[in-house]
Amino acid sequence: MSDNAVSEEPDVADVVGLLDDEHVRSILVATSAEPLSAKELGEHCDLSVSSIYRRVDELCDCALLAERTRPRRDGHHETVYVSTLDRFELTIRDGELDWTIDRTESDPADELSRMWGQL
C-alpha cells in the first residue's frame, strides 16, 4: 500500500458496506485522533491483529485510511495508520443519489515534524 492518491472514487456500496462494520468505524474514529499501529488498534478495538489488518487493507483500498511510518527510539520504525475520512455524505433528492467523501489533507513535512516532536 502507498500514500498515493486514489485515481478513482470507490464504489458507494463498498464504502457503505465498510462503514456498516462497527469495528471499521472504531478504527476510523481512533485513527482520526492519532496514528496507531495494528497492534494498538487491536487493543483499542478488542480485535485480533489479523482482523485489524483485514479491515485496514479494505479501508486503505477505499482511501479512507493511510499508512504512515513512525520512527521509534530504538532506531527501527513501524507502520501506523491514520484516518483520511473527514466527512461522508449521502444525498437522495429529486430521484438522484449523490454522495461525497471529503478526505483530510495531510502534509508529509508537518507529519514528520509532529512525529519528531514526540520523540
Image (cartoon, rainbow, N blue to C red):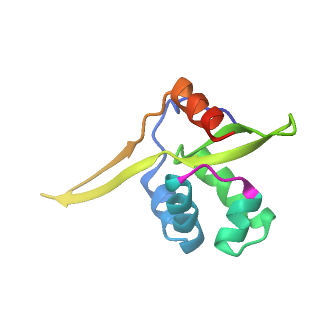
Q: Position of residue 52 (x, y in %)?
A: 71, 62
The image shows residue 110, relative to residue 43, as above or below, that is above
> Which quarter of the figure has residue 119?
top right
Extreme residue in the left direction: 94
The image shows residue 67, relative to residue 95, as above or below, that is above
The image shows residue 91, relative to residue 48, as above or below, that is above
Relative placement, left or right, of 58 versus 16 is right
Q: Between 30 and 9, which is closer to the camera in this rendering?
A: 30
Residue at point 55%, 71% (across, down): 21
Q: Position of residue 38 (x, y in %)?
A: 74, 56
Q: Position of residue 65 (x, y in %)?
A: 57, 47
Q: Position of residue 99 (x, y in %)?
A: 31, 51
Relative placement, left or right, of 71 versus 63 is right
Residue 17 is a magenta residue: no
User: If the image is split into quadrants, where does the N terminus sit?
Assistant: top right
Q: Between 85 and 9, which is closer to the camera in this rendering?
A: 85
Residue 35 is a magenta residue: yes
Residue at point 73%, 73% (across, down): 47
Q: Main secondary structure of the magenta part?
A: loop
Extreme residue in the top direction: 109
The image shows residue 39, relative to residue 10, as above or below, that is below
* Residue numbers of the magenta segment: 34-38
The total of numbered circles placed on residues is: 0
> Which quarter of the figure has residue 96?
bottom left
Residue at point 74%, 66% (across, down): 51
Residue at point 48%, 33% (across, down): 106
Relative placement, left or right, of 107 versus 45 is left
